[in-house]
Amino acid sequence: MRYAIISDIHGHLEALQTVLRDATSRNVQQVLCLGDIGADPCVGLVRVNRAEAVFGNWETSGWRGLSAQNRQWVLNLPPMRRYHHFWVSHATPGWSPGITTLKSYLALKSPGSFRENFPYFTTESLALWNAFYELLGANIPLLLHGHTHRQVVWALNDDNQLERSTPRTLTLSPKTTYVVGVGSVGLPKDSALPSYALLDTQTRTLEFLRVAHAPAG
């Protein structure tokens, strides 16, 4: 299965169009969207492409500015999605079992939970180690996240050695657990170009892509 993983669009429609065209040219079979989509045109395009999405921190307040139909769709987004060999979330994988949708998060959240649920995995931190704890406990080798607007790989090997890297292509090792930032479509902080990731579960590879803007053909 070939997945395009996009995140942090923040209302940049042209960048989203560019990334989705590039993903189509690479024979992607499913788009995964990791939140912070932005205004109605971007939400609409994500929905038209049948992306499987999660909510990000933007959606926790930005949902009010969407159309009625898009508000309902966003309010029903889960905080994370679990696939056979990997998970996706806007940031942390450590969500309370009671939070199953954005609507339930808005109803149940307490002071301090926002920071706990949307940490930045830019440096080695307790939040990062907690993410690895969640993955190892579930025997899941890979978390794909957004939020940082950067393409960064944290790899924890079987000797508990943690390494940070920014490869263009990553072959997933069976003895390593990964926390991976997929970059940002709309507001990348590590490039001038829209970025996303492509996961091929058959070859066990991740490609980190940056795409030049091009007019629709």
Image (cartoon, rainbow, N blue to C red):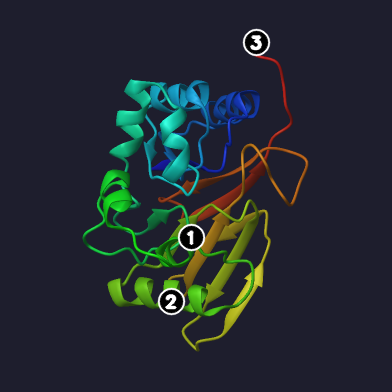
Q: Secondary structure at mark 3?
A: loop
Residue 175 versus residue 19: which sits nearer the camera? Answer: 19
Q: For residue 74, which quarter of the picture?
A: top left
Q: Label 3 neighbourhood size at 10 Å, few (<14), some (14-19), many (20+)? A: few
Q: Position of residue 153 (x, y in %)?
A: 59, 64
Q: Earlier in the sequence, mark 1 or mark 3?
A: 1
Q: Amino acid at mark 1?
A: Phe
The residue tagged 3 is 217
Residue type of the residue flagged with mark 2: Asn
**Position of the C terminus by quadrant:** top right
Residue type at mark 3: give it.
Answer: Gly
Measured Cα–Cα span from mark 3 to mark 2: 45 Å
Q: Which residue is mark 2?
A: 130
Outermost residue on the right side: it is 192
Q: CA distance from mark 2 to mark 1?
A: 13 Å
Would you say residue 3 is visible in this rendering?
no
Sequence-first tag of 2 and 1:
1
Q: Closer to the observer: label 2 or label 1? A: 1
Query: Is 104 on the left-hand or right-hand side of 2?
Result: left
In the rendered image, which quarter contains the N terminus?
Answer: top left
Residue under label 1, please give it: 118
> Mark 3, mark 2: which one is toward the viewer?
2
Residue lying at 61% horizontally and 38% vertically, measured from the top left: 185
Q: How many marks?
A: 3
Are the residues tagged 3 and 2 within 8 Å (C-beta)? no
